[in-house]
Each structure stands twice: as structure tokens, then as C-alpha cells.
Image (cartoon, helix red, strand yellow):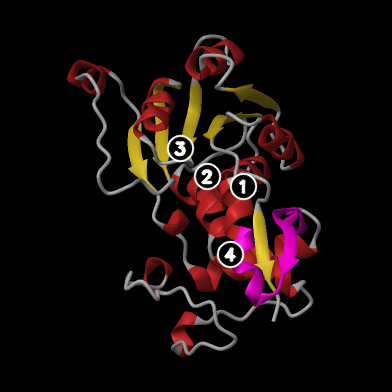
Amino acid sequence: LLDGTPLSGALGIGAFAEKTLVAAGQAVKVDPAARPEAAGLIGCGVMAGYGAAVNTGNVGRGDAVAVIGCGGVGNAAIAGACLNGAMKVIAVDIDDRKLDLAERFGATHTVNSRKTDPVEAVRALTDGFGVDVAIDAVGRPETYKQAFYMRDHAGVLVQVGVPDPGMTVDLPLIDLFSRGGALKSSWYGDCLPSRDFPFLIDQYLYGLLDLNAFVSETIALDQVEEAFTKMRRGEVLRSVVVL
């Protein structure tokens, strides 16, 4: 910046530019019938969330699932859980607007964690047992602990929300010892892009995965800063730059 603040690409790869150069191995061919604005979202948030549920969490038929954080990644996890046969999908957020969106992606129940204890609410919705898979799509110590305790004793915790490097989690060691299941981190949905990207596009074209619902708006390149402001205020799922 003009004031001397150093800038870097998002995750080391971001480029708000009209053209960028990538290695051929980083590009994946998909069906050109897909709407480009929707297809482009698979390359990040949609794959991360969908994969957290399907690849990392192994959500299966009849499972109960809780997803904490109903932004783009969380809603993709909700959609993935539904597509993979989950019977009960509980969306948890502090914003009723996001909970309304979560229902569009298939959430069967919603919990506003600003108004009620989310762990108690999720347990009440699962006859006291807790969920088979709890997905933290926020990445904060509070939400990680909520996900940890809203599982059943054989349940899986999947962290896909990216935490600040300085954050730490404090849990009683006896609780870690006494609870079964698994604690997993999901890096980019544990995906194989050459396999998973075309599959998700097919699901979209078959009408099974509503990628269009993730596109809150399309913008020009010079509207990026305004779009970030909307994102911080929780007004959009995704603003897509169209060149």
C-alpha cells in the first residue's frame, strides 16, 4: 500500500487481476455448460465445505450432522451432508439471516447460538445423544469446543474453518480421554480436484447441488473492496468478480 503496508496474495495464490498464470496441473476441465459464475466457486469455499462433510466427515445415510457457521463453507457442508443422505442436518449460527439461507441448502433444523446454548439445543434435537458428525466452519476456540461437546460418544468432529494462528483451545484432558470418535482437520475438503470438481459440476447440472444459490451478486473488479465490506457485515455468501 501507499503507506508502506506489505501486501500478499490470499493464501499465497490470490490474484485480483484480469489475467493470471498457472501451471497446467492446477487447472481442471469441467463441463462448459455450467454457469461460469457458479462453477468458479467450486475452487474454494464450496469444495472445502462439501468435502468436510463428505470426504473428511464421511457423512452417510441416516446420520445426524451439525454445522457451526452458515457462510459459504458451512452451507456447502450442509448441502454435501444432505446429498450424502444425512437424515438430520442442524445449522448453527448467530445470524437469523444465515440460518434462513441454511434451510435453502437443506438444513432440517436451525439453532441461533446467540439466543440459546447450541450444545444443549443440538442434544435436544438428537434425543440427548448428540450428532454423528459436527463440523466447525468458523474456526474459533468457542466453536471448536461446541462441536466437540455436541457429538455423540462415537461422533466425529471436523474442523474446516481456518483459525487465527494465535488461537488455542483449552479442553479438560479427561474429556478428551473419555470420549471416543475422532477429531479431524479438513484441508480443502480433503479433495482430489480432478475427481471432485467435475463430479460437483455434474451434480449442479443435474439439479442436485444449487451452486447458483451461493452467488449473492456479480461485481466488477473495481468493486472488490465494497464486496469485502458486505462480507464482513454478513450480507452476502459470495460476491463473484466477472471480467
Magenta span contains residue 100 = no
Q: Which residues are magenta?
A: 209-227
Q: Decide: marks 1, 2 in contact (CB < 8 A)?
A: yes
SS class of the residue under badge 4?
helix
Q: Which mark is residue 53?
A: 2
Residue 169 percent across, percent down from the top left: 26, 32
Q: Amino acid at mark 2?
A: Ala
SS class of the residue under badge 2?
helix
Q: Amino acid at mark 1?
A: Gly
For marks 2 and 3, give the CA distance.
10 Å
- Mark 2 or mark 3: which comes first in sequence? 2
Q: Which numbered disc, 3 or 4, marks the residue closer to the eye?
A: 4
Query: What residue sits right under mark 4 in the picture?
Result: 225
Query: What residue sits right under mark 1 in the picture?
Result: 80
Query: What residue sits right under mark 3 in the picture?
Result: 136
Residue 229 percent across, percent down from the top left: 59, 54
Residue 190 percent across, percent down from the top left: 43, 57
- Would residue 142 appear left or right of 127 to someone viewing this image? left
Q: Nearer the viewer, residue 62 or 134?
A: 134
- Mark 1 or mark 2: which comes first in sequence? 2
Q: Residue at x 54, y 77 (%)?
A: 16
Q: Residue at x 79, y 77 (%)?
A: 33
Quadrant, the N terminus? bottom left
- Mark 3 or mark 1: which comes first in sequence? 1
| Residue 63 seen in the current view | no
- Mark 3 or mark 4: which comes first in sequence? 3
Q: Which numbered disc, 4 or 2, marks the residue closer to the eye?
A: 4
- Would residue 176 appear left or right of 181 to someone viewing this image? left
Q: Decide: marks 4, 2 in contact (CB < 8 A)?
A: no
Q: Which mark is residue 8?
A: none
Q: Amino acid at mark 3?
A: Asp
- Mark 4 or mark 1: which comes first in sequence? 1
